[in-house]
Amino acid sequence: MNEQDSESLDSLRESSAFDLAIRVAGSKAEVQVILHEFNLSEVDLADRFPVLAKVAQGLPDETAPPA
């Protein structure tokens, strides 16, 4: 599936805004907020936007307890 295809991200503008928001997110917690704003789940992110899912996986997890 094309990374710009999505039922909830109807326009190229929305898709571009989503892409940028995920790429500039500073933490996994921020990604969760972005997903909520775009009405997507983590599964949707992984299925529809695998490249962005990999970007999000590399972010620090602010909700994790300190090591």
Image (tube, rainbow, N blue to C red):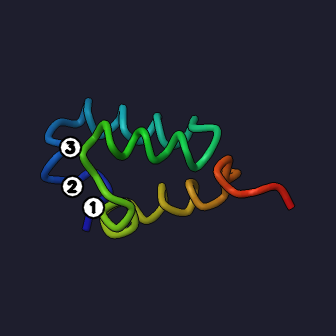
Q: Name the amino acid, label 1.
A: Asn
Residue with the mark numbered 1? 2
C-alpha separation, residue under disc 1 versus residue under disc 2: 5 Å
Badge nearest the viewer, 2 or 3: 3
Distance from Cα at disc 2 to Cα at disc 3? 7 Å
Task: Determine whether the residue tagged by mark 1 lies in a helix, strand or loop.
Answer: loop
Q: Residue furthest front?
A: 65
Is there a contact, CB below 8 Å, between mark 1 and mark 3? no
Q: Are marks 1 and 2 in contact (CB under 8 Å)?
A: yes
> Which residue is at a point 53% across and 39% down the rendered structure image?
30
* Image side of residue 1 versus residue 49, left or right: left
The image shows residue 19, relative to residue 47, as above or below, that is above
Q: Which residue is mark 2?
A: 5
Quadrant position of the N terminus in the picture = bottom left
Where residue 15 sits, quadrant-wise, is top left
Disc 3: which residue: 9
For badge 3, the amino acid type reads Leu
Label 2 sits on a secondary structure element that is loop
Residue positioned most to the right: 67
Locate residue 9, reporting x and y percent: 20, 43
**1 or 3: tag closer to the N-terminus:** 1
